[in-house]
Each structure stands twice: as C-alpha cells, then as structure tokens.
Image: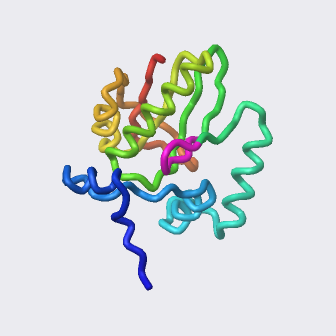
Amino acid sequence: MATDINYGPTNAIRQQKGMGPEAPDKSVTDILREYFNNGNTKEPNFDSFLTKIMVLLKDENNRLVKTGNTVFFLTNLGDGVVEMHTITSENPNEFAKSLQGLAKTLKSQGLKKIVSYADRPAYIEIAKRTGMPWKTSQTTRVTGGQAGPSYLFELEL
C-alpha cells in the first residue's frame, strides 16, 4: 500500500500556500548516491565515489556538513575562510534555505568567509534567493585539466 507524504500540520500549511509537501529528510549516503546516480561524477561506481570522499576527509581541513537535504563539502583555507562544494537533492528555494543555515552555523563557529565556484549562471539566482550579500564574479577555472568559465561566489560572514 502506498503511503501519502502529504500528512501533518506542516505539510497541510505548505499545501495551502501552494508550496507542496516538505521533502523527506535524506541521509548523507542517500544524497551522495542520488548525486552519483545523476551522473555528476566521473567515478566508475558508487563505492569508488565514497572512497574518494573518505580519503579527502582524512585531511583535517576537510569536512562534510549536512543541512536540509544538502551536503556541503568544506575545506578550511585558513584565516577563517572555507571553500564550499555542494551536493544537493533540494529544489532552489530549499537549497537557498540550506545555504542560509550553513552560513549561520559557520559564523557561530567563528569563520569569516565562504568561497565557492559554479559553472552555471543559475547559481547566481540561488545566491540572490538567500537574501545574503554574496559577491559574484566571472572567472576562469581549471577543472579536469581543462580551463573553462566559472563563477566565483564570496560571502563575508
């Protein structure tokens, strides 16, 4: 028997506002698996993708933070600056809220700045949806041995 996820007062209010039900909370592994299954990595299989992440996490400057249904891979660059990479299964509005939550968490931990890169201009709109003062600029970045256009995002916390 199928279960209807449109239950509970929160989802009823969201439905009345035309927002649709809240997305069910996913585990970090589920978010990573969805990212892998959508072809967002060049790793040959999910196990090698997870292994690569685990190897990166052995460096004490790297960590994962989950907010909502987004996993943020953070690298401490020193002087209160972190570089952020995202793996999300959220729609743009939910993702914007997760970014707000991450910024609040990092600020409370004494960090001063988030930097990130994206190859699609759609992320500029998501940054605007957060209501936070992201600075964006266009740059060139080398990924996988090839230079290409990229957008730099910076947020002073």
Q: Residue at x 35, y 41 (%)?
A: 123
Colour logic: rainbow
Q: Is residue 87 left or right of residue 15?
A: right
Q: Is residue 8 magenta?
A: no
- Residue drawn 34% across the image and 64% down it: 6
Could you say where residue 16 lies in the image, as x and y percent from the top left? Answer: 20, 54
Q: Is residue 130 left or right of residue 55?
A: left
Foreground residue, 128 or 115?
128
Expressed as whole percent of the image width and height from the top left, the position of residue 12 reads: 28, 56
Q: Is residue 121 above or below residue 36?
A: above
Camera-side residue of 122 and 156: 156
The residue lying at 72 percent from left, 31 percent from top is 61
User: Where does residue 74 sit, x and y in percent of width and height?
Assistant: 61, 35
Q: Extreme bottom residue here?
A: 1
- Residue 71 magenta: yes
Looking at the image, is 137 positioned above or below residue 51?
above
- Residue 82 x, y percent position in the rendering: 59, 26
> In the figure, is residue 99 to the left or right of 6?
right
Q: Nearer the viewer, residue 11 or 68?
A: 11
Q: Specify the principal SS of the magenta part.
A: strand
For this rendering, which residue is in front, 119 or 31? 31
- Which stretch is magenta? 66-72
In the orientation shown, which residue stands out farthest toward the front?
Answer: 9
Q: How many marks?
A: 0
> Which quadrant: the N terminus?
bottom left
Question: In the image, what residue occupies the spot 53% across and 68% down?
Answer: 37
Q: Which quadrant holds residue 41?
A: bottom right
